[in-house]
Amino acid sequence: MLCRDFREIADSYLSDELLVETNHEVIRHLESCADCRTELTARRELRSKLREGFQHSPNLQPSDEFAGRLKAQLQDVALSGSRFSVARAAYLAIAASLVIAAALGLRAVYPRWNSHRDDTMAAALTQSASGDHRDCALNHRLAEAPIDLDEAGRKYDRAYIDLVKAVISEGKLPAGVQLVGAHSCIFQGRRFGHVILSYQGELVSVLVTETESQSSSPKETEPVTTAQSDGYELAYFNTERHVVYVVSGLNEPANLSIARAIAPSVSKHIRDAERVA
């Protein structure tokens, strides 16, 4: 792949819209091209700033007056029953259309973003994941001693049972990845299932934790999103009630290659546990 080819599909790569074979070509190119890695980082930062600008723009927020009128109209309709008028129905249809149009406008900018997660919670989870990788996998300085992963699965979260098998069993991890250990640990009050790998001289943490929010329509194949926190590379994906992080000091393509390799099997394993729970 040439640099000009990468630039043409970079945004599709960030949105996880490419075929698996094309993703592999991009990753191989990024591993050897510092200029394109810089380009990718710049595009990701621009996306992040645009997203924040849309979410916090006062012009895109519904006014208190509009919200109050809509609430009053809905309450009136719920109580009036058969007195529901054509004029009121038209008003509500227009109001609903405005709300839908605003939502579609945001989705047009970030159509693949995981909208079911609250931004504040996502940021806190990202910091917790990088902090757990640092304090547990690298420095071994957690306040509470880790426990066996299967034991934690029986006591706290069924998704932890046989998590190691889900990570390594399908043989899709990049050549050279080795299993170092696995356990369940707590960082700043949050429990994680923690599988530790080794790759290219770096320790890699695969971290699984429950989230407070739920997706009303979970996907069978979750997109993998990347981020940076505390100097570490992160790649993560969601199921209905869990988020899975891959955290390391590797470069972005290498870290992302591990996340994409485990995403199908780990997502399936966790979805199966969620259905039983």
Image: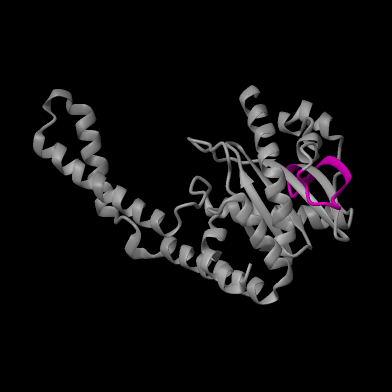
Tag count: 0
Query: Which residue is depicted at the point 32% across and 54% down?
Result: 102
The answer to whether one can see residue 45 in this image is: no
The stretch of residues the image draws in magenta is 172-192
Query: Which residue is depicted at the point 48% across and 64% down?
Result: 52
220 horizontally vs 76: left or right: right
Query: Which residue is depicted at the point 32% across and 64% down?
Result: 59
| Residue 162 image point, x, y percent | 79, 31
234 horizontally vs 22: left or right: right
- Asked whether 186 falls inside the magenta stretch, the response is yes
The answer to whether one can see residue 24 in this image is: yes
| Residue 202 position by quadrant | bottom right
- Asked whether 118 falls inside the magenta stretch, the response is no
Question: Which quadrant is the N terminus positioned in?
Answer: bottom right
| Residue 127 image point, x, y percent | 68, 57
Question: Which quadrant is the C terminus positioned in?
Answer: top right
| Residue 128 image point, x, y percent | 71, 53
| Residue 155 position by quadrant | top right
Out of 178 and 130, give the one closest to the viewer.
Answer: 178
